[in-house]
Image: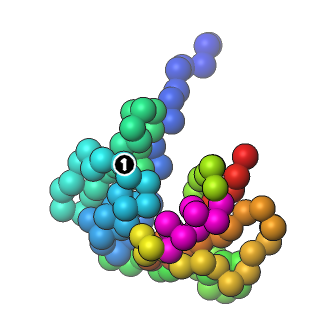
Amino acid sequence: MPRPRMTLWGVVLDCPDAQELASFYERLLGWAREQDEPGWAKLRSPDASTGLSFQSEPAYQRPSWPTQPPEQQMMIHLDFRVDDLERAVEHALAAGAVLAEFQPQDDVRVCFDPVGHPFCLFEN
């Protein structure tokens, strides 16, 4: 049986408030909000290749990073390729991100969004 065609449509991040976290990523990425309804928001990349969605989850627990058992560990993180690492970090911080204290690589910067999801900025 041939494999059916599958395309990654997007990534969904759980969070305490979908609209608030979507606003952060709007500032960070400059992507337009495509959907906005109670408990759900979706941003679409300018090239419409994929989306980033946010779902309100009342029982959301902020992940720990680096992992610190028995605390909630991260299950996913986002990687963003940037053209200027220093400027990208400054922009992320101005948008509301927090720079992680632990940085495992010299050429990558780990940041946290306002609800603690880690994301990486790297030049390539």
Horizontal and vertical percent for residue 56?
Answer: 32, 67
Q: Which residue is mark 1?
A: 31
Which residue is located at x 79 percent, y 72 percent? Answer: 104
Give the quarter of the image for residue 110.
Answer: bottom right
- Please tell me whether the stretch drawn in magenta is mainly helix, strand or loop: helix
User: Residue 83 or 71: which is nearer the viewer?
Assistant: 83
Q: Is residue 86 magenta?
A: yes
Which residue is located at x 52 percent, y 27 percent? Answer: 6
Mark 1, residues whose alpha carbon is within 10 Å: few (<14), some, or many (≥20)?
A: many
Answer above or below: position of 72 versus 6. Answer: below
Identify which amino acid the numbered label 1 is placed on.
Trp
User: Residue 50 or 85: which is nearer the viewer?
Assistant: 85
Can I make out residue 27 in this image?
Answer: yes
Furthest-top residue in view? Answer: 1
Q: Quadrant of the N terminus?
A: top right
Horizontal and vertical percent for residue 49?
Answer: 45, 33
In the rendered structure, the answer to whether residue 44 lies left or right of residue 77 reads left
Give the quarter of the image for residue 16.
Answer: bottom left
State which region is magenta. Answer: 85-93
Horizontal and vertical percent for residue 67?
Answer: 71, 78
Can I make out residue 77 in this image?
Answer: no
Does dot 1 land on a helix, a strand or a loop? loop
Horizontal and vertical percent for residue 3?
Answer: 60, 19
Which residue is located at x 64 percent, y 79 percent? Answer: 100
Which residue is located at x 64 percent, y 65 percent? Answer: 86
User: Residue 77 or 123: which is nearer the viewer?
Assistant: 123
Colour option used: rainbow
